[in-house]
Amino acid sequence: MSGRTPEPRRIVTMDAAVAAVAAVAPHRGSEVVPVAEAAGRTLAEDVVATTDLPRSDVSAMDGYAVRAADTVGATPEAPVRLRRVGGSYAGAPLEQAVGPGEAAAIATGASVPAGADAIVLLEATTLDGDVVTLTDPGAPKHVRRRGEDVAAGTSRTPAGTRVGPAGASLLAAMGHADVPVVRPPRAAVIVTGSEVGRTAGGARDGVFDSNGPLLAALLAHLGAEVVHRDAVADDAEALAAALDRAAASGADLIVTTGGASVGRFDLVRRALGADAPAGAEGAPGFDRVLVKPGGPAMLGAYGAVPWLGLPGTPVAVTVVGGLLLDAWVHAALGRRGAPAWGRPTAAVVDAPVRGDAKKTALWTAEVHVDAQGVRRARELGRDGASRLASLPSANGLLRLPAGASHAAGDVAEVLPAPFGA
């Protein structure tokens, strides 16, 4: 482990930091899992429908399946009468065809019998023996056509799709019990700082460890697997031992918090040194990022394992760490679209917002749509990189270029919060 304290010399923009972290993402191949376990996973291949969905013309309503031509002009004053010839129900379709002057009872989701091309709603009918009296004409719109949702041999779930509960339902409906998903990238988390983990009665500056649970939950939320967690005091030998344990855990990325500045006890920066990240030929590491909060973030390597060093303040870990780790997981899983950093939208700010003179500013925000349909953003907690209380309310990040500011009512750029739901 190097004992040098290098002067920051690889100072990069947030754009460059996101690209560099994405460049060290691993590619771990795929595995097959049951559809019921696929939620939260990312598809490794296009998944093609094995059958039409729906598999036949089906009724969208309870009522009677009819030939539309037999019901033209039906009203309460001039009803149409047809002969009932049986019923079609989900799992028990009517096998015989509906002929001229005939109607078949039908339930929602049941196959429409041959010959029928429209549905009359149940409430517009009465039945007397085998005679059905209709007071409305049959409506073809109540028939869901075979394959109108998904046609056999096509895909609505391409590679790179993150599967949600509705997606799992669609995959099952398309005829799949198992699906191929990308293996998650693996991360090791080390929280540093002699003050971390102190309980009541300890040193006055002692703090409970909030970064460890934060990073474990954040990585899991993004789709990574945390294979190792550790916490060490500000001690060079203890840090070296923790890094050895992390490297031996099989992690694809080591993530540390704390020790990232240039003070006496900022051992992480000394240990990280100037090594380029492993596994990313031609991709530079960095020593500092032109962003606030989170500027002391670093990227290097410990042996053959890429190493992302984050500041110790929880808001900086959440904001900058969240965006960088989101880009890393996004690249590792081959997800469709862009990571959160590349998906800006616009919102009207409710109050004046001031950025930083020389750095990109990322302020946590609560984004909502008002009663007039205007998307608005309310800045939260700009005045402290360690203030946690506002984070649970944040669902976006106001992104202000260096030197930018906004008056109340201005339109500002907003990023989705990668640490949000």
Image (cartoon, rainbow, N blue to C red):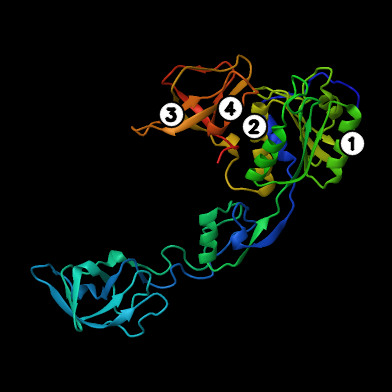
Q: Which residue is mark 1?
A: 241
Q: How many marks?
A: 4
Mark 2 closeness class: few <14, some 14–19, many ≥20 residues within 10 Å = many
N-term-proximal mark, 1 vs 3? 1
User: Which three-letter amino acid code belongs to the residue tagged 3?
Assistant: Arg
- Which residue position is annotated with label 3? 376
Please tell me the numbered disc located at residue 318: 2
Q: Residue 23, position in %: x, y?
A: 72, 39
Q: Position of residue 409 (x, y in %)?
A: 41, 21
What residue does disc 4 label? 389
Q: Secondary structure at mark 1?
A: helix
Gap in angstroms between the C-alphas marked 1 and 3? 48 Å
Quarter location, residue 203: top right
Residue at the top extreme of this rendering: 357
Mark 3 and mark 2: Cα distance apart in space: 22 Å
Question: Alpha carbon of mark 2 to alpha carbon of mark 4: how far?
Answer: 12 Å
Nearer to us of marks 2 and 4 is: 4
Quadrant placement of the N terminus? top right
Residue type at mark 2 is Thr
**Residue 86 pos. (x, y %):** 29, 83
Q: Are marks 3 and 2 in contact (CB under 8 Å)?
A: no
Upstream in the sequence, badge 4 or badge 3? Answer: 3
* Label 3 environment density (alpha carbons within 10 Å; few <14, some 14–19, many ≥20): many
Earlier sequence position, callout 4 versus callout 1: 1
- Mark 4 or 3: in front is 4
Name the residue: 89% across, 36% down.
241
Residue type for callout 4: Ala
Q: Quadrant of the C terminus?
A: top right
Q: Are marks 1 and 3 in contact (CB under 8 Å)?
A: no
Spot occupied by residue 91 in the image (x, y as percentages of width and height): 42, 77
Q: Is residue 404 left or right of residue 272?
A: left
